[in-house]
Image: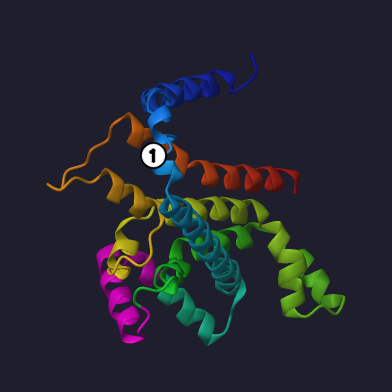
Amino acid sequence: MEKGQIGALIVCAVFILIISAPVALAIAGWTQALHPFGPLTERTFWRATALSIAVATLQCAGSLSIAASGGYVLAFGQSASATWLRRGVLLAAALPPAALLLGGFKLIGFFGAMNTVWAVVVPGWMTAGGILACAAAYRRMDTATLAAAELDGASELQAWWHVALPAVRPTLAALVTWNLVMPWHQLLWPGVVWWDGSHQTLSLWLAERTATASGTVSAGPAQIAVACCTAIPLAAILIVVTSRSKRA
């Protein structure tokens, strides 16, 4: 048996055990979910799916851009602005999520961006963890390649784009996965900034479908089937991202 195969088999067995119950319930409720008047035939489901894809894509693109560029400055910057950036990122990483949530809510209200897509997307761009992860990846790369690029006449922007960025591609692939999954399943923040109900992601749509008048949650086979269906677009996107990162 090859090295690590036993551990992989154990992990797969535990994973199958965990997902077996919801998958079995989803199969049982599949007929109800696909009924002509079932939840998957509603227009609101497809609108929520399109909005979830748009929010996850925009948040991932912005967060990845800021993490990749900010991490480079954090790793190699020697100016006073780089020092202040380093302090600000560490402070943002140390702050509790509740403080960031309240501060973001006040800031969005000040700019009048409530009940807009950007109210959900933009706060997700400021990820201290992503910047720190990219900075750590940049520090592990061979700096001689950057020096060689500068000797060949490349500007700092060109050296970052053509030399440094490809060197941290595995870290960027992990951040892509994280920044797609988090906004896709996010429930609290969209519910706070979209208080008028004009926008709904799949998480909000599913929460509305499963909530009862008494405030409890009703999760029968049909609801479980719908919940599993909401993960299909995300799973397809993640498969494409991971396969492309492997080939790269």
Q: Quarter-wise, where is residue 145 in the image?
A: bottom right
Pinpoint residue 12: horizontal percent, then vertical percent: 50, 23
| Residue 99 visible somewhere in the drawing | yes
Pinpoint residue 60: horizontal percent, then vertical percent: 54, 61
Query: Which residue occupies the extreme front position in the image?
Result: 36
Q: Residue at x 41, y 70 (%)?
A: 123
Q: Give the labeled residue for mark 1.
A: 38
Left-right relation of 58 to 244: left
Left-right relation of 16 to 221: right
| Residue 143 visible somewhere in the drawing | no
Q: Residue at x 38, y 65 (%)?
A: 199
Residue 156 covered by magenta stretch: no
Give, as a three-letter code, the residue at label 1: Gly
Pinpoint residue 96: horizontal percent, then vertical percent: 28, 64
Q: Secondary structure at mark 1?
A: loop
Query: Which residue occupies the extreme top position in the image?
Result: 1
Q: Where are the magenta residues, as a range?
A: 90-113
Query: Which residue occupies the extreme right position in the image?
Result: 152
Around disc 1, counting alpha carbons within 10 Å, would you say few (fewer than 14), some (14 to 19), or many (20 or more)? Answer: some
Pinpoint residue 94: horizontal percent, then vertical percent: 33, 65
Judging depth in this view, the residue of 189 and 218 nearest the camera is: 218
Figure coloring: rainbow
Q: Residue at x 66, y 57 (%)?
A: 168
- The answer to whether 195 is drawn above or below residue 232 in the figure is below
Q: Residue at x 42, y 23 (%)?
A: 14
